[in-house]
Image: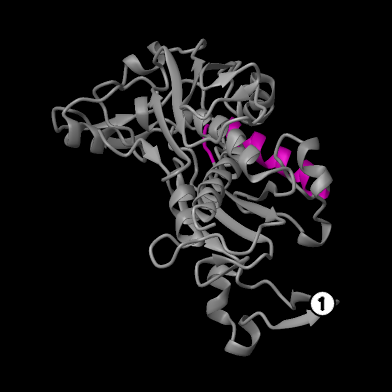
Amino acid sequence: MTGSSFGKLFKISTWGESHGNSLGCVIEGVPPNIKIDDKYIQKFLDKRKPGQSKFTTQRKEDDRIEILSGVFEGKTTGTPISLRIKNTDQKSKDYSKIKNKFRPGHADYTYQVKYGIRDFRGGGRASARETAMRVAAGAIARKILGEKVKIKGALIQLGKEKINFENWKWDEVNKNAFFCPDKHSLKKWEKYLLKIRKDGSSVGAVIQITVQNVPVGLGEPVFDKVDALIAQGIMSIPAVKGVEIGKGFECAELQGEENADEIEIKKNKVNFLSNNSGGTLGGITSGQDIIVRFVVKPTSSILIEKNTINKQGKNTKIKTTGRHDPCVGIRAVPIGEAMVAIVLADLLLLNKTYK
């Protein structure tokens, strides 16, 4: 299997399965003498880890990070950094009854056909469990970008329920279990998702990632445009089905004079009068905020019986038991932040090769 690596200069390679012994990653291209320790990385993993509220999976994993190489006396050495998280709360027996059936919406069928073998325990490599290592790598990517660059994510739609954008406050995001910027939506969301969970079903979500204080000039035309690489990184997250930058699909409803971001000089600085482009022009960062939104589909593992087939090619029924998120979009917020950080760190290092 290829496809487990991402990036050019800041390159991450992840390994591990949902119910295997451990998850891990190797990060190459990190400059030396950057202060990093496990406590710093852990605070980002704690935002993503399961079992923290009644609105996510009840699988209890501490996701305790171990730094195996590339860091000495609290600083990076310039050599590959190796990280590991041990799995501690697997319940593989939940999958033994359906190991010969293909779960609708999952990668069971395609993995079986492509490789002739698959790890049926929680989806194996196809599980979103692997994204823990992306979050760990994203923490290191933020160090390369520096403290000035702020990467912030929020859940802006839960199923059919949307936030009121006039109530948006970033300070609210880390005060609730949904990463929601609109505190007035919380009670409605709680009631809505608890009913979905009680019914044995699931819902999708929309997440927004905003990056502030981005330097001008990141991105490499033609195929390595910053928005193209962000889209690739975000689309690689399990369950993501769509990405938009800036106004995105709303641009189709605008006329040219409405969509193009006008420019002026104000107080001897370049000033944009709008940000429909989402912080990128011609695939290169403009210095404006990068605005990324992505949609996550409903969790495919649900308690409602569905039609499927088995390995013998026979029609059958399936109902997935076990512990699952009623909305995987909630924990996708820190994952989306991490992938954007990884893309920008890679492009920043590439920019430095020109100087």
Q: Where is residue 176 in the image (x, y as percent from the top left)?
A: 77, 36
The amino acid sitting under disc 1 is Asn
Q: Would you name the residue on which mark 1 appears? A: 268
Extent of the magenta region: 184-202
Q: Is residue 58 visible?
A: yes
Residue 198 is inside the magenta segment: yes
Residue 335 is inside the magenta segment: no
> 20 above or below 221?
above
> 252 above or below 95?
below
Which secondary structure, mark 1?
Answer: loop
Task: Name the chief secondary structure element in magenta.
Answer: helix
Q: Can residue 303 be seen in this view?
A: no
Residue shown at 67%/54% (left/top)?
210
Tell me if 243 is positioned left or right of 309 in this view. Answer: right
Q: Where is residue 178 in the image (x, y as percent from the top left)?
A: 70, 39
Tell me if 32 is positioned left or right of 156 in this view. Answer: left
Split into 4 quadrants, where in the image is the N terminus?
Answer: top left
Residue shown at 65%/59% (left/top)?
215
Residue shown at 69%/20% (left/top)?
39
